[in-house]
Image (tube, rainbow, N blue to C red):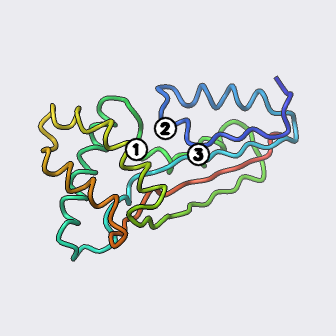
Amino acid sequence: EGQFDLVHCPALLLHLREPEKALQRMTKAIKRGGWIFVEEPDYGLFGATDPDNPSAAVFNEVHRAGLDLAQKTGIMHPYFGRRVRSLIENPGFTEVGHEALARVVRGGEPLARMSAMTGELLAPLMIKAGLLTQEQFEVVGHLYQDSRFYFLGTLMFRAWGKRT
């Protein structure tokens, strides 16, 4: 307790069943006058940037179904990012700040490949649940590799505060 000048928590809390408890432990680890910096994604805007693209509807539909499944099964809380400021304001921080960064991702880029890998992990669950067909999975997989396809990735929320 009270050992660190800075605690940085990137993209962790959305995966925990009790994120508030984890944040309390992190808060205790910070020295008085030290800082916490939390970054959590939010998938609320995730989707194709060009609605006129013939594959945009499939891309968006597949991702909505996947995000709903992830939330229902407790794999992650896909809309968690928007909560980070309120989590930091509660435990006694001053100089609290908050921002969000949106990323536009192009097929073939590292973030597109990471999204494709996540999709490969979720696809069997989604197919079994009847939320995704093999054909839809293949369409989306192709889009993640297509340098002509752009999508809005996660909205990364960031919040910080100084421990009192």
Q: Which residue is mark 1?
A: 78
**Mark 2–mark 3 distance (CA, rounded to whole Å):** 14 Å
The answer to whether marks 1 and 2 mark residues whose Cβ atoms lie closer than 8 Å is: yes
Tell me the mark number nearer the camera, choosing from 1 and 3: 1
Mark 2 lies on a secondary structure that is: helix
Residue 144 is left or right of residue 65, and the answer is right
The correct choice, above or below, for 140 with respect to 72 in the image is below
Q: Residues within 10 Å of mark 3 (few under 14, many from 20)?
A: few
Mark 1 lies on a secondary structure that is: loop
The answer to whether marks 1 and 3 mark residues whose Cβ atoms lie closer than 8 Å is: no
Q: Residue at x 69, y 56 (%)?
A: 97
Mark 3 lies on a secondary structure that is: helix
Q: Position of residue 57 (x, y in %)?
A: 19, 63
Q: Which residue is mark 2?
A: 14
Q: Amino acid at mark 2?
A: Leu
Q: Which residue is mark 3?
A: 86
Q: Amino acid at mark 1?
A: Pro
Q: Amino acid at mark 3?
A: Ser
Q: Residues within 10 Å of mark 2 (few under 14, many from 20)?
A: many
Q: Residue at x 87, y 41 (%)?
A: 33
